Every structure is written in C-alpha cells, then in structure tokens.
Image (cartoon, rainbow, N blue to C red):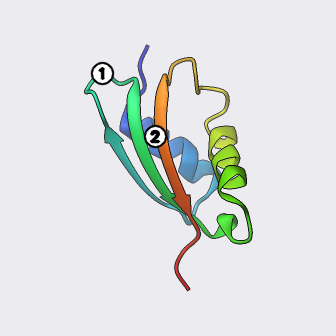
Amino acid sequence: MPMDAHEIETLIKATFPDAKVEIKDLAGDGDHFAAHVVATAFRGKSRVQQHQMVYAALGGRMGGVLHALALTTAPPAE
C-alpha cells in the first residue's frame, strides 16, 4: 500500500518536531516523493548523517511502502 505525503511528513515531524517539511509526490503514484527537510537537529551533521536521520525517522519504510524519496536536508539558516 503506497504512502501519502501527509504520512511521510507526520513521521518526520514525530522525530524532528521543529522541522519544516515540504513533500511533493513526483509521479502521483504514492511511491515516488521528494522531501525537503530543515531541522535544528541537523546542525553540525554531514549531509549523509542528515539523510540517515530522516531515513531512521521513516522507520524502515524506505524501499518497502516508500519506494523512492529524493531527499534534501539542511539546518535552519542562522
């Protein structure tokens, strides 16, 4: 069963309550999304670490119910 954008945002915000999250359904199929996540938890982390943190927040759904996620992350601008 595909996920919807709201579910992805809810999972991310459960781990990063202060995050600004933008989700786009790229193909209209509930399987291919783009997400832009800005969170204070990303400060001092590499881009790879930031992405790993988001994937962890998704609780193992990547590669299963969530087939593809084009992810961009950043800490808030200071």
Furthest residue to the top?
A: 1
- Image quadrant in which the C terminus is located: bottom right
Look at discs 2 and 1 and give the one toward the viewer. Answer: 2
Query: Against 10, is 28 above or below?
Result: above
Residue 73 horizontal/vertical position (percent): 54, 57
Label 2 SS: strand
Residue 1 located left or right of residue 19: left
Residue at the spot of label 1: 29
Residue 12 located left or right of residue 7: right
Question: The disc labelled 1 sits on which kind of residue?
Answer: Asp
Residue 62 horizontal/vertical position (percent): 58, 27
Residue 67 horizontal/vertical position (percent): 49, 22
Furthest residue to the front?
A: 47
Residue at the spot of label 2: 70
Residue drawn at the location 62% of the way across and 57% of the way down: 16
Query: Against 10, is 77 above or below?
Result: below
Question: The disc labelled 2 sits on which kind of residue?
Answer: Ala
Residue drawn at the location 46% of the way across and 40% of the way down: 70
Residue 41 horizontal/vertical position (percent): 68, 65
Residue drawn at the location 47% of the way across and 28% of the way down: 68
C-alpha distance separating marks 2 and 1: 15 Å
Residue drawn at the location 74% of the way across and 71% of the way down: 44
Residue 28 located left or right of residue 12: left
Q: Looking at the picture, tell me which residue is in the foreground, 49 or 55.
A: 49
Q: Which numbered disc flags the more N-terminal residue, 2 or 1?
A: 1
- Crowd class of label 2 (few under 14; some 14 to 19; many from 20; radius 10 Å): few
- Image quadrant in which the N terminus is located: top left
Label 1 SS: loop
Residue 38 located left or right of residue 58: left
Identify the mark at residue 18; answer none if there is no mark. Answer: none
- Crowd class of label 1 (few under 14; some 14 to 19; many from 20; radius 10 Å): few
